[in-house]
Image: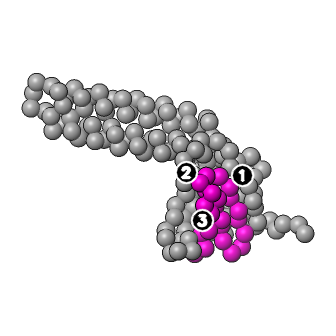
């Protein structure tokens, strides 16, 4: 039996080109924040309070950037590695083997450049979930099929 046009099943792949852009963004930012934070923290002036703030921001950006890069490379335990779309729900298989099904309040968001899209919804337990997918994580035909299947959730 043939699949309907609004049913798509696919496996995600690592987005190595996107990781390079993320590294170009996060490495200088984190380096600058941590180095200037150390400078203020151990400086001779009474600017230790500024060092605390810069160090906090540096480590915060390090955690955010690290999580983003790990999800793009599909090595984070909660990174989606498979997507299954049909009329009733959207099922996401995570790297750790768990399966999340978005069943209610599903929304589909695209960016203007067409390089990524976001999915939000409520799973079976009533928890709100949000996911961002990038074009390089899919083959071109699959990406177009996914966008077409998710159009009704805009």
Disc 3 to disc 1, C-alpha distance? 15 Å
Q: How is the image coloured?
A: one colour
Q: Residues within 10 Å of mark 1 (few under 14, many from 20)?
A: some
User: Is 88 within the magenta?
Assistant: yes
Disc 2 to disc 3, C-alpha distance? 13 Å
Which quadrant does the N terminus fall into? bottom right
User: Is 153 within the magenta?
Assistant: no
Magenta stretch, main secondary structure, is strand
Which quadrant does the C terminus fall into? bottom right
Q: Which residue is mark 1?
A: 11
Residue 43 placement (x, y as % from top left): 15, 25
* Secondary-structure class at tag 3: strand
Disc 1 to disc 2, C-alpha distance? 16 Å
Q: Which residues are magenta?
A: 80-105
Residue 148 seen in the current view: no
Relative side of 72 to 11, left or right: left
**39 over 48 or under it: above or below:** above
- Residue at left offset 57%, top offset 74%: 124
Disc 1 and disc 2 in contact, CB within 8 angstroms: no
- Using the rendered view, name the quadrant where residue 53 is placed: top left
Q: Nearer the viewer, mark 1 or mark 2?
A: 2
**80 over 154 or under it: above or below:** above
Q: Which residue is mark 3?
A: 100
Q: Which residue is mark 2?
A: 77
The residue positioned farthest toward the right in the image shown: 1
Of 147 and 90, the residue lying toward us? 90
Labels 1 and 2: the sequence-earlier one: 1
* Secondary-structure class at tag 2: loop
Residue 138 placement (x, y as % from top left): 70, 48
């Amino acid at each position: 039996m043939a699949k309907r046009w609004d049913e798509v099943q696919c496996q995600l792949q690592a987005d190595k080109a996107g990781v390079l852009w993320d590294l170009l963004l996060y490495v200088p930012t984190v380096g600058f924040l941590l180095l200037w934070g150390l400078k203020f923290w151990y400086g001779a002036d009474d600017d230790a309070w500024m060092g605390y703030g810069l160090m906090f921001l540096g480590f915060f950006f390090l955690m955010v950037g690290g999580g983003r890069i790990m999800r793009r490379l599909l090595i984070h335990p909660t990174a989606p590695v498979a997507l299954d779309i049909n009329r009733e729900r959207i099922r996401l298989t995570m790297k750790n083997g768990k399966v999340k099904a978005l069943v209610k309040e599903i929304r589909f968001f695209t960016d203007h450049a067409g390089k990524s899209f976001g999915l939000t919804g409520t799973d079976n337990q009533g928890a709100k979930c949000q996911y961002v997918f990038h074009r390089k994580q899919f083959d071109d035909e699959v990406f177009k099929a996914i966008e077409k299947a998710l159009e009704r959730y805009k």
